[in-house]
Amino acid sequence: MSSPRSPWSKRSLTAQAMGHVDPITKAVVPPIHVATTYIRDEDNAYSSGFVYGRPDNATIREAEEVLAMLEEAEAGALLFSSGMAAATAVFQALDPGDHIVASKVMYWALRNWLMTEAVRWGLKVDFVETDNLDALREAVKPGATKLVWIETPSNPLWTITDIAGAAEIAHAAGARLAVDSTTASPIHTRPLNLGADIVMHAATKVLNGHSDVVAGALAGAKADAFWARVVNIRKMQGAILGPFEAYLLMRGMRTLHVRTAAQAKSALDLAQRFSNHPKVARVLYPGLPQHPGHDIAARQMENGFGYMLSIQVSEGEGAAIRTAARVGLWKRATSLGGVESLIEHRASIEGPGTPCPPDLLRLSTGIEDVEDLYRDLDEALRG
């Protein structure tokens, strides 16, 4: 699909960062604007459009424009200092006493925040299996529920929630739908087009893709009063991304299309091959026909099924931990979405109360040779 302001495709616009050219030097890579304050006009106005660095910055605006274009976000996009800062800003825009329904399987740090800090602030939170629309419908309280928060595919089980179905349920109850689309990225899923009101990204992950930026992002379907509250929260709490990080993020997004295509292709290849591996009890990947959410994923995802998968090791938790210890090419590290492939025994990270099975290894597929990735993990599994 083309941008409404350009005849070029999203892939072309992303590769050229919307075609921004420095007006002074004519450089094809825009400069990094690090100024924190700006000159007022003689009448005390700010004709440049910039006042102070906490709420706004030219480099950040350029990166936000790329993301808003990718998500087709009418309200635009906002960059935050982390994915957690972006996500919590949405919840902070609610009022004490508001009810929230959230995915039971989701990013663990946000789930912990919802169980602790959000409750302390007076929010009421219920966790449900949102891939079950009947369970979601039962959990929503018309008039009381103000936000439905889903993550799809959900980390680290990669369950799939029907975004359009969840939007219908949320809106019928008078609630907004927010979607954590970190794993899918706007290359694979555009939640706003499926009825979501807000989409969130931990931009640290595949949007940046190089494991050198911590960032978060929100994109909004419409610039309503709720979105204005989110904008003000970022401004007042100083949660904006730094200009250098925004520059690196924009650099990363220029190759988003080619990276996600290569990563999704390798992830599917690995998922298919490990499905028949004698040391693997189960592979969790929405691109496999046997995955419970495959049909919905095929309907709402494009250009592949993403770069994340998990395997459950047939000999249990101990064997899973030993497998992660034996890899060479795969890197034992937290995070995901980078050009390097990562492996993690997720239950060890999440600790008590996690819905993650103890025999599970989470795999973030990078852009290395898929044969090397398979051989390395195969040898580690076989010991």
Image (cartoon, rainbow, N blue to C red):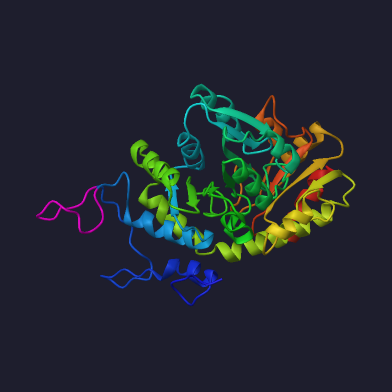
Instruction: Quadrant for the C terminus, please.
Output: top right
Residue at 48% from the left image edge and 42% from the top image edge:
86
The number of discs equals 0
Furthest residue toward bottom? 7
Classify 20 as above or below 129.
below
Q: Considering the whole magenta stretch, tell me its main secondary structure.
A: loop
Instruction: Quadrant for the N terminus, please.
Output: bottom right
Classify 114 as above or below 188.
above
Between 245 and 329, the one lying in front of the other is: 245
Residue at 66% from the left image edge and 50% from the top image edge:
163
Furthest residue toward top? 120
Question: Magenta residues?
Answer: 37-51
Residue 300, can we see it?
yes
- Does the magenta run of residues contain 372? no
Between 235 and 147, the one lying in front of the other is: 147
Question: In the rendered view, does 135 fall on the left or right side of 252?
Answer: right
Residue 372, can we see it?
no
Between 157 and 317, the one lying in front of the other is: 157
Residue at 35% from the left image edge and 64% from the top image edge:
30
Question: In the rendered view, does 73 fall on the left or right side of 286?
Answer: left
Between 290 and 220, the one lying in front of the other is: 220
- Does the magenta run of residues contain 40? yes
Question: Residue 320's spot in the image, x, y percent?
Answer: 78, 37
Question: Residue 359's spot in the image, x, y percent?
Answer: 79, 35
Question: Residue 158's spot in the image, x, y percent?
Answer: 72, 46
Question: In the rendered view, does 318 fall on the left or right side of 83?
Answer: right
